Amino acid sequence: MGTIDISFLSLGIGLLLSFIPLYYLWKFKTGLVKATAIAIIRMIVQLFFVGMYLKYLFLWDNPWINILWVVVMIFVASHTALARTRLKRSVLMIPIVIGFLFSVITIGVFFLGIVLQIDNIFDAQYFIPIFGILMGNMLSSNVIALNTYYSGLQREQQLYYYLLGNGASQKEARAPFIGQAMIKAFSPLIANMAVMGLVALPGTMIGQILGGSSPNVAIKYQMMIVVINFTASMLCLMITITLSSNSTFNKFGVMKPVFKEEK
């Protein structure tokens, strides 16, 4: 038995539920009604477009087109990550692109080729969803971590220079700030991991069960999805922070201006 389709009429009726949170946002004068309404509309339009082009990607199932899609998505994700931070594009664009590119390819190919052992790792059925999941999770964790890392260095300059003045190398002086960035970025993921399957069933598992997979198959996929997301996000973060730090600190350990000037 396949997944039950949702008619456009049923979808429209279901979307009416969004008026409940919108009402409470309006009632308590949060100022978020307009932003939420725009976000919902954007989500609907964007997902319809995604559905349209994914249909053709799956239909063509061409390795070169699939690779091109991943490359484009990496640049889009990098641009989005920068847009969500207060950091200068000139400082972080190249480190973020390299971090995304290396992490998503390394972990994605490892999962598809070694764990799943599929003959064609560029098969659209596996290649596109797995690489898409990886990029989505890497994006959110990197945005949080980079903001935390550079904001911490700016806010606690005295601590940073104190560590340098007491004989610490630049890497050693920056280590506490990297640790704080990791805590901020990965604490929610670790918390969700700890209660996964007890408090709620994760999305990947639900999707596979609805698609007809047995629960035993679904839980194995879910375990691996969590692990590869965690690993790829951590790898991407370390590459991005390492490369960006090399360009944002001079030989004396002084941080160059990295934040956008507020207008």
Image: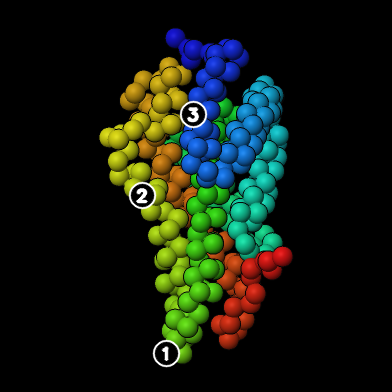
**Label 2: which residue?**
190
- Please state the horizontal and vertical placement of residue 260, each as a whole percent of the image: 67, 66
Give whichever of discs 1 and 2 has the lower sequence position: 1
Residue drawn 64% across and 70% down? Answer: 258
The numbered dot on residue 261 is none
* Amino acid at the residue labelled 3: Ile
Identify the element where label 1 is drawn.
Answer: loop
The answer to whether the residue labelled 3 contacts the one labelled 2, judged by CB atoms less than 8 Å apart, is: no
Q: Nearer the viewer, residue 29 or 65?
A: 29
Question: Which tag, 3 or 2, sits closer to the chain's start?
Answer: 3
Question: Which residue corresponds to the image point at 54% horizontal and 74% vertical from the top-left?
Answer: 154
Residue identified by numbered label 3: 20
Seen at 30% across and 44% down, the residue is 194
Q: Do the residues labelled 1 and 2 touch (CB within 8 Å)?
A: no
Percent coordinates x, y for residue 251 in the rendering: 60, 84
Q: What's the CA distance linking mark 3 and mark 2?
A: 31 Å
Mark 1 closeness class: few <14, some 14–19, many ≥20 residues within 10 Å? few
Front residue of 199 and 2: 199
Q: Which label's residue is closer to the chain start, 3 or 1?
A: 3
Residue tagged by mark 1?
166
Q: What residue type is labelled 2?
A: Ile
User: SS at mark 3?
Assistant: helix
Q: What element carries label 2?
A: helix
Question: Badge 3: few (under 14), some or many (20 or more) residues near its Cα, within 10 Å?
Answer: few
Where is residue 237 drawn, in percent x and y?
A: 51, 58
